[in-house]
Image (cartoon, rainbow, N blue to C red):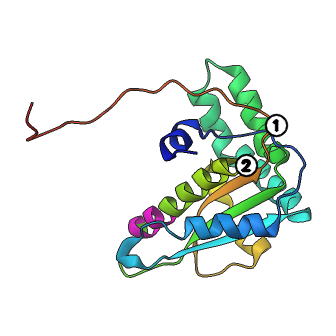
Amino acid sequence: MELKDAIRGRRSVRKYKPTPVSKETIMELYEMASWAPSGMNRQNWFFVAVTGEYVKKVAEICHQGYKEYIGSKVSSVFSHKPQVVKETTSFFATLGGAPVVVFAYAEPGPESQFTDVQSVSAAIQNMLLAAYDMGLGTCWMTGPLNKEKEFNQLLGVEGKKLVALITLGYPDETPKPPKRKGVKIDLLGFDQ
């Protein structure tokens, strides 16, 4: 697959087949993620991949977080699209049946939290593109971050900043591409 095709073809998947994803596949995705750029080349990402009973517990925490925080924001933004609100509410409760959830953390560094988050975000994007190339679906989730304490407790993680959750599995849908909002860029000093 050409990189341009992966960039244009990758979608946020919210419905998954129950087919398991192997440890070898997870490790290959992590290896692709690890080639991302990072502030001071610290490569300060830390990933935790869970499956089985852990996914059920993660879904419970996500659903609670949705009810407490992000649900009202989704309802406000999509007040004109009740079906989107309904589907989003369902996704946070079930994670779309994803067999794997990946937690992406930043290990704090000497610069700033912004640098740490950007470095991990670059690694996440690598992972999402690699997953798409391998026939997998993903959804990059930041809505559940208000439940970081509960996730850390479940996973036994300390001293790291949760950046995102990523649902992962074989897609059971083919989402349509959302309309692009156009190029938002100023080109200064370029010849005509």
Identify residue for label 1: 172
Identify the image quadrant of residue 79: top right
Report x, y in % for residue 124: 56, 59
Q: In the visual, does 3 lie left or right of 158?
A: left
Front-lying residue, 69 or 163: 163
**Label 2 amino acid?**
Leu
Segment colored magenta:
114-120
Q: Earlier in the sequence, mark 1 or mark 2?
A: 2
- Is 124 rendered above or below residue 129? below
Residue for point 48% across, 76% down: 43
Identify residue for label 2: 136
Report x, y in % for residue 29: 66, 63
Q: In the visual, does 114 lie left or right of 108?
A: left
Residue for point 50% across, 69% down: 35
Q: Secondary structure at mark 1?
A: loop
Residue for point 76% across, 74% down: 155
Front-lying residue, 22 or 15: 22
